[in-house]
Amino acid sequence: MELVKNIFFNTDKIIEGSKVKISYVGYLFQNGSEEVYLHYGFGINWDNVSEVKMEKTELGFQCEIDILEGECLNLCYHNENGEWDNNFGQNFTFPIEKQEVEPNIEEETALVLTKETGMQMRKGLRKTYIWSKKIKLAIYKLITCVPKIISGNYRRKVNE
């Protein structure tokens, strides 16, 4: 994905908690710099500022960074001679999306066997989760069974 001319990412979205590979073919690459460093931080105030030496390839300078918490990723570049590419003093800024948290289904649907009740749902199981599963199952049965009943193609299994 190219968000800004001469800066490419290996992903469509920059997501908090992920790794992102950054490719740079901007001013410093075009003018023959031998070493380029990525200077980056997160949020409006440039929190967690870090710097990493980028690897020079035929296709530009590349590196991989971890995306930390913040509403945006701020980037600028400098070479071994102290020349900077910082988008004319405005830096390169890209939005960071929050990571979607998926529920741990294995933990929530675990069953506990007891002598008195046979099976009992684990304490962490949410009632809304149970109801959503029941509703989905009922809709599935309606979608698959009702057309068969209406068309007459529904046959009961008879035990002989």
Image (cartoon, rainbow, N blue to C red):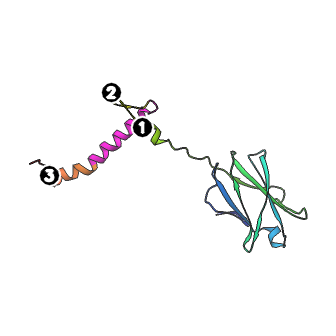
Instruction: Specify whether residue 1 is painted magenta.
Output: no
Measure the alpha-carbon separation of dots 2 and 1.
17 Å
Q: Which residues are magenta?
A: 123-142
Q: Residue furthest right?
A: 81
Report the front residue among 63 and 96: 63
Name the magenta segment's main secondary structure.
Answer: helix
Report the front residue among 129 and 66: 66
Measure the alpha-carbon separation of dots 3 and 2.
38 Å
Q: Count how many numbered circles sit on residues in the image.
A: 3
Location of mark 1 (residue):
110
Q: Residue furthest front?
A: 115
- The spot of residue 104 in percent (x, y) is 49, 41
Location of mark 2 (residue):
115
Q: Amino acid at mark 3?
A: Arg
* Left or right side of 144 for 56: right
Label 1 environment density (alpha carbons within 10 Å; few <14, some 14–19, many ≥20) = some
Residue 155 numbered tag: 3
Task: Of the two numbered discs 3 and 1 on the same chain, state the one appearing first in sequence.
Answer: 1
- Quarter holding the N terminus is bottom right
Label 3 environment density (alpha carbons within 10 Å; few <14, some 14–19, many ≥20) = few
- The spot of residue 126 in percent (x, y) is 44, 33
Query: Quarter-wise, where is residue 132 in the image?
Result: top left
Between disc 2 and disc 1, the foreground one is: 2
